[in-house]
Image (tube, coloured by chain):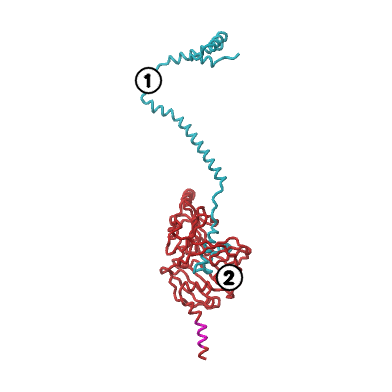
Amino acid sequence: MSHPSEQISAYLDGELHGQELAGLLEHLSGCGKCSAELEEFHQVRAAVRSLPVLELPENIVSEADRVVVPLRRNRGVWVGAAAAVVALVIAVAAMVTPPPTAVSVDDLSSRFGARVSLDPAFSPAKVVVPELNLVGE
Amino acid sequence: MRRLVAIVAVIVVIPASVAAASDLDDLLERSREASYSAEQIISCNTPDGLRDAVVRIAQDRGDIWIGSTAGGDLEVAAGSGGWTLLRGGDAVTTASVDSSDESVEPLYTVDDGMDSQFLGRSAMTYSLIRDGVLRAELTFDDVSGALVEAMTFLEDGSAFCKRVFISFDATPPNLTSVDPVEGVGPEDDAVVLTDLPESIEGFERLDLYLDDDGSTFAYYSDGFFSFAVFETPTTVTLPEGVVVEVGESVYERSFTAGQATYVWETGVGGMALVGDLPPDLHESVLASLPESETRGLLRRLWRSLFG
């Protein structure tokens, strides 16, 4: 046998009508567990309604701000997570995208050497031989 | 008898009078036209230590072949705007450029020369002085006009590089021709947007080249020493480079026998300086070029943190 706890809650809120209401009342009349649950709900409601009404303190706004802090922390976590995802995407893109080809200094030396060979001062004293020089280093 | 004396006098005087012209361009031009084979020692005292090499040289009317004496199969063929590195006779790297007819107003004064002997041959040694500072001593073979010895100096008078022939054969060599590649011509300054100065410490910007990849190459000369400055959209790799601080900036630097190379980044791309100028001029020249930024800052930060 199933116990309609949700319907009990709806009943207390005045949301049950017609056949649903009649069915619940019939069930309550024959089910001690649900009748006890209904009674507990009544007592909780009565206790809550008996609490005194308090005046709000003047610094309620700053107090409220303090209460909001955990929410901001949560937002920071989400922002951090989003940033991590973006960083991951960028890192993957960087790995997939071929890097710009670095220029070899040997290529530059050859262009310098070519231009020097047109210089009036071109001579064995000016020839650029970086590769060969490594032999003697 | 008087006729014989006159003929002998002409034979003796002609080489000496040509060499005594004492004009740097004339001396170097005559040297370019010489034909010979030789072995040359290059020894440079650089801020990063001694750099030396021994190479074989064959020159014929402006074209020069250089090979290693260490048994390697690498050779360099240079001349007429071309530069080719060959391995086993096959071209590995090649470059070719044209030039404008821009020339440098001579900064050097050349003395009258001093008779000397070199490898048992008559020679003349000239001093090149710039701004009152002896920068080079060049020795030319009297008969062939070949530049057989070149000493370059720092501002304080100490030697920077010595290039000296240890053997010399004035027989014209039989050079193998290298297939020419199409040369890149210099651009009109007005067309190329560049922040490279027109003049740096007496070095005039003679030509400016623009490559298809957007890189710029400027060639500077003071009439004897020269260097090239490259601006590239990407970085420049210098495998043998060491990190050095020059002035207020940080660079990667490498010396080979006779050549200095600096590499740095400006934040918008890579830059390189390649040249044979003496090290005491490096700081002032580099300070006139776009400043080293990104990598320098990172490196300085790294060094400040970890030494």
- The part of the image, by quadrant, that contains residue B96 is bottom right
Residue B247 at x, y percent in the picture: 43, 57
Q: Which residues are magenta?
A: B5-13
Q: Residue A131 has which mark?
A: none
Q: Colour of chain A?
A: cyan
Residue B118 in the image, given as x and y percentages of width and height: 53, 76
Chain drawn in red: B
Chain bearing mark 2 = B
Disc 2, disc 1: CB below 8 Å?
no
Q: Is residue A116 above or below residue B34?
A: above
Q: Residue at x 54, y 43 (%)?
A: A91
> Residue tagged by mark 2?
B58
User: Is the residue A15 above or below the residue B85 in the image?
Assistant: above
Magenta-drawn stretch contains B7 = yes
- Expressed as whole percent of the image width and height from the top left, the position of residue B134 reads 44, 69
Q: Is residue A137 visible?
A: no
Q: Is residue A36 left or right of B190 when viewed as pictured? A: right
B215 or B274: nearer the eye?
Answer: B215
Q: Principal SS element in the magenta part?
A: helix
Alpha carbon of mark 2 to alpha carbon of mark 1: how far? Answer: 105 Å
Element assignment for label 2: strand
- Which of B184/B249 is in front? B184
